[in-house]
Image (cartoon, coloured by chain):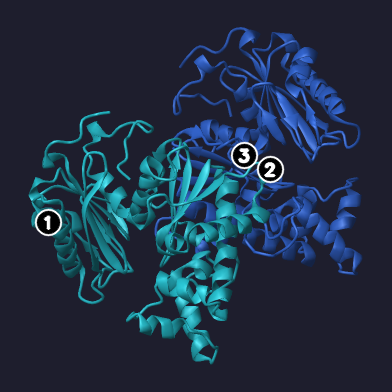
Chain colours: A blue, B cyan
Amino acid sequence: MLPVAATSRQFRGGIDLGGTKIEAIVVDARNKVLGSSRHPTPATGGPPDVAAEMAAAMTEACQAAQVQPSDLVGVGVGSPGVIDEATGAVSTARNLPGWEGSYDLGPELASKLGTTVAIGNDVQVATDAEFSLGAGRPYRSLLGVMWGTGVGGGLILNGKPWIGRGGAGEIGHLVVEVGGARCPCGRRGCMEAYAGRAAMEARARKRYEKGKDTDLFKLMKERGRTKLTSAVWAKALERGDKLAVELIDDAVDALGAGIASALNLLDVDAVVIGGGLGVRLGEPFVERIRKAMMPHLFNDANPPDVLPAGLGDTGGAIGAALLAKPKSTRRPRGTATAGN
Amino acid sequence: MLPVAATSRQFRGGIDLGGTKIEAIVVDARNKVLGSSRHPTPATGGPPDVAAEMAAAMTEACQAAQVQPSDLVGVGVGSPGVIDEATGAVSTARNLPGWEGSYDLGPELASKLGTTVAIGNDVQVATDAEFSLGAGRPYRSLLGVMWGTGVGGGLILNGKPWIGRGGAGEIGHLVVEVGGARCPCGRRGCMEAYAGRAAMEARARKRYEKGKDTDLFKLMKERGRTKLTSAVWAKALERGDKLAVELIDDAVDALGAGIASALNLLDVDAVVIGGGLGVRLGEPFVERIRKAMMPHLFNDANPPDVLPAGLGDTGGAIGAALLAKPKSTRRPRGTATAGN
């Protein structure tokens, strides 16, 4: 055993920036969470408002961990949108308010927090976290499927993240039905058009407005929400709400087909399923997705492992905090000691 | 310029083992083709008959190159089926006669030819050849799509072949239509169910037998064929045969969707389209596939290059011959001097 970090100079921050919530954590050198804070993502305004909310959440997490933001080794951010890792600029983050253009999120946060900030793709950092510290630890290659508002994918191939020309991992936009349902991305027949929470909500609302009986929107209001959150879906399924069951069945079928397609192409060791819906619905639904995948899997005599995310919904923030690790101290796979 | 190989000890053999034909070549150290021979693949019998035909083709190619098979540095084979690269065994090669089980193709050929034999996946070696010597030379990552009897895929990621757990590259079995057409693999809705020549022929035959007007089978007979070869399809298209046009349109749509799906996941630098149909139909159809891909491409502001195979239908045999290259003399990418 190595000695536990003695000073807060070895603490790192991680922020998972989602369309619904901002989660900030502080971890020690062994990736143990020392403090955390969760803020709703601003629904109006623009990038500076989001950055201010992120800084506020990080500051609160630091208070809980009894450390000053400026004493952190650095802060990592998992962000949606197109990320310029070199400059810290984030552009076309469509789930965030007024973020069609480019915004220097990294430099702005660095100036607010008084420490260095590294930005990566939200889904990729969550996959990296599962690979280094979560359910993906036993494997050399991994497909992370983050099932939430959208369906994002992260890839680890031969121990390293694969991002292609910067845009890899869009598993939600594998075509499972040529000419099929309209996807929030504007295209047709994408897996996300059936399995993304935003697409499912739009479909539910349409059917509800046409008179289809469902408790989904009642449950939403009871919980004081304006969106069908993962918890709302889970509750509706628990009650056997027919529309919810039907839409989730379609989502599971689409996920099965899309994940099988990805595996037929890449034949990785394992698939880890996380994201808001993936974590909330958990193991029984991961098993259903695995079953839906099998009829489409080419190498069905030797299927890869399909597992629920090991880090739950904190994986995104933990993965973000990994970005803040000075490169020279990143330990090779297998020797990392996870605090989770 | 390096001096040209002075002795036949630097010559290598390559055999592309297909469901329709066996192509054998002899190349020099600079991958220049010195001799070649083409035999039809036996339609009956079993693996020993296929091996005998391969040895005969290789021996003829050697005669053309004025070298003894036993003087070759080695012979590489691109084979369908499941390949054990270590032992040279090939199993479940479903397009070959009586090849459901395992057969020691490597050792058998080595004994017949008197030189070492290395075996690789047919689609992967064709992709490797395009990457090292063909249309893929300017790129670091590549998707090879071999459009023929089936639709196979080969991957080069960051300069190296990616085979996953041994079964990667099955792009023909990406699901483009959940619950769609039956694929020769037995599953439903695979890209190959629409785009593979075998599936297209089965569909054409069914419609023809139901009274649909088409010249496809007349053209086949005129050419003394028992299958709708790529040349038959090309001729029918040239004549504007309605059924051929319709089925090829469906194939192009399926290829567009499947290739876009693969790119959304991997975001590689380029796609190279080869295979029997790909090479025969050539550039105009590669352009059609590129157009069919665009509506499904997530990163459509920055699409990768989509190119026809640079080595034509000899690419498979040239790639096979690369397998016979002693590893120590394989040159790093970019410094190889191709004879083609």
| Numbered tag placed on residue B301 in the rendering | 2
Q: Picture coordinates of residue A46 (x, y %)? A: 87, 31
Residue matched to label 3: A167
Protein chain holding label 3: A
What residue occupies the far bottom of the structure in this picture? B211
Proximity of marks 3 and 2: CB atoms separated by less than 8 Å: no
Q: Are marks 3 and 1 on the same chain?
A: no
**Residue at screen point 58% across, 39% down:** A310
**Residue at screen point 54% across, 92% down:** B211
Indicate the secondary structure of the residue bearing disc 1: helix
- Spatial distance from mark 3 to mark 2, Cα to Cα? 11 Å
Q: Is residue A57 above or below residue B257?
A: above
| Numbered tag placed on residue A283 in the rendering | none
Quadrant position of residue B179:
bottom right
Closer-to-camera residue (A205/B114): B114
**Residue at screen point 31% across, 36% down:** B337
Q: In this rendering, which labeled residue sits more in front, label 3 or label 1?
A: 1
Q: Are marks 3 and 2 on the same chain?
A: no
Quadrant position of residue B334:
top left
Q: Is residue A314 left or right of residue A333?
A: right
- Spatial distance from mark 3 to mark 1, Cα to Cα? 50 Å
**Residue at screen point 50% across, 24% down:** A337
Label 3 Cα neighbours within 10 Å, binned few <14 / some 14-19 / many ≥20:
many
